[in-house]
Image (cartoon, helix red, strand yellow):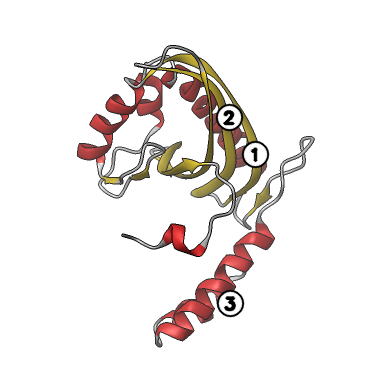
Amino acid sequence: MDGHRFKQLTQMMDHGASRRRMAAGLMGAALATLAVKRVGGESLARGESMTVSDEHDLEQAIQRMRSATAEFMQGKPEAWKAMCSQRADATLFGGWGGHERGWEQLGPRYDWAAARYAGGEVTFEEFARFATADLAHTVHLERSQARLVGVDESVPVALRVTHVYRREEGGWKLLHRHADPLVAIQTTESVIEQ
């Protein structure tokens, strides 16, 4: 999406709820057309200002995040926390529910969540990735055979995950994580807040 089209869409969002919904749908569709399904090493969809070197740096950061996730499942959050933005606008919609914003909330939450794990193995199935020179996102499934504290045997855990990365001080940091259980398509009633 070029800068002119993005400006038009954001201006539409300033003019009423129906236009906001329409603009949000158009923006989502535009982003979806930029994302590339990652199968068999296909290339990354990248913004105009993304260089091959930037792509390599991002790939390295994503691999470090995956390694940090494996350590997290061993009850060790240190590598994970080192990969995270510690700025006030960092956010989490965690796989255990709830939401946090800012490092004062995120740091303790990551410690709490890692303490729920007693081991396990995790794999990643990436569906899409998009990046510019300073922002990137991935969409993937995390499937694990996890040993959870208080549970006698390993259990399968599958999460739908979106990560948003931002370049900070020359390196990529996790700015936002949204993870929730992989479930079948739900009925209308299941999404109504009680």
For the residues marked 1 and 2, what is the alpha-carbon distance in whole angstroms?
11 Å
- Residue type highlighted by circle 3: Arg
Mark 1 or mark 2: which comes first in sequence? Answer: 1
Mark 3 or mark 1: which comes first in sequence? Answer: 3
Q: Mark 3 vs mark 1: give the one in front.
A: 1
- Residue type highlighted by circle 2: Arg
Tag 2's secondary structure? strand
Q: Is residue 14 above or below residue 139?
A: below
The residue lying furthest to the left in this view is: 104
Tag 1's secondary structure? strand
Q: Position of residue 160 (x, y in %)?
A: 54, 42
- Residue type highlighted by circle 1: Glu
Instruction: State the mark number for residue 10.
Output: none
Q: Is residue 117 above or below residue 20?
A: above
Decide if residue 51 is on the left or right side of residue 98.
Answer: right
Q: Mark 3, residues whose alpha carbon is within 10 Å: few (<14), some, or many (≥20)?
A: few
Decide if residue 33 is on the left or right side of residue 22.
Answer: right
Quadrant of the drawing holding the N terminus: bottom right
Q: Nearer the viewer, residue 121 or 164?
A: 121
Residue 162 seen in render: yes
> In terms of image quadrants, where is residue 42?
top right
The residue lying furthest to the right in this view is: 40
Q: Which residue is mark 1?
A: 126
Quadrant of the drawing holding the C terminus: bottom left
Q: Which residue is mark 3?
A: 5
Residue lying at 30% horizontally and 50% vertically, measured from the top left: 89
Q: Which residue is mark 2?
A: 143
Residue 12 seen in render: no
For the residues marked 3 and 2, what is the alpha-carbon distance in whole angstroms?
37 Å
